[in-house]
Image (cartoon, helix red, strand yellow):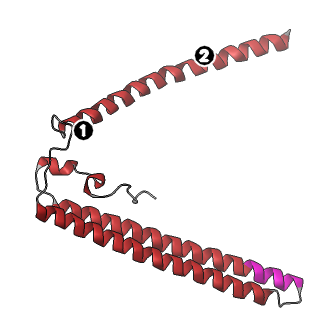
Amino acid sequence: MYMKNFVTTMTLVALLGVAPAFAESNNTLGSFQEKKDDIKAKIEDRRGEDGKPIITLDATQIACIKTAITKREDALIAGHDVYAVAVKNAYTTRKTALLAAWDKTDRLERRAAVKAADKAFSDAVKAARKTWNETRRGAWKTFETERKACLPQTASSASVSSSDTGSSKSDASL
């Protein structure tokens, strides 16, 4: 009997504790809906009656943006080439170190050499990845700065995004 009352009491306490959480989540949902509506309104303000962006670019501005895109893509290609070479070198170095480790007759020495080879490989790959990410972020940051400089300095120029200037997918968040 005591156990049944205890379980019932605990169930009620749990339900009463959860109810306010559900009430708060509805407020959050309303806030989200308001933000969504604000964003939709801003997008509609930036578009004409036909739904297309209001901003128009002249040939010089388009050429400027194309130059910025070329510089970004060239930097990304070069950065990836550096990354690929670094990872390939890490594999080559690990292979050499593992082969040397297996020349050791003492099991403990061999195990230590294998662990050291794996650690060096891991560190080299992490360093290559860090360099690649810095290069990638830098290329995108430079592009965004150059792209903004290409656009007319009006209120509507702030609304042009990377997707409007030749990028199907922003790489900056990777």
The part of the image, by quadrant, that contains residue 38 is top left
Provide the residue designation for mark 1. Answer: 43
Residue 95: % across, % down: 70, 84
Q: Are marks 1 and 2 in contact (CB under 8 Å)?
A: no
Residue positioned most to the right: 106
Provide the residue designation for mark 2. Answer: 16
Inspect the image, locate mark 2, and give the three-letter code of the amino acid beneath it: Leu
Residue 88 as seen in the image, left or right of residue 139? right
In the rendered image of this protein, does residue 16 appear above or below residue 38?
above
Q: Mark 1 or mark 2, which is nearer to you?
A: 1
Residue 63 as seen in the image, left or right of residue 112? left
Secondary structure of residue under mark 1? helix
Q: In percent of the image, x 86 and y 8: which residue is there? A: 1
Residue 165: % across, % down: 25, 57
Pick the front one: 122 or 68: 68
In the rendered image of this protein, does residue 104 appear above or below residue 153?
below
Q: In percent of the image, x 14 and y 48: which residue is there? A: 55
Find out whether residue 110 is within the magenta segment. Answer: yes
Where does the magenta region start and end? 107-115
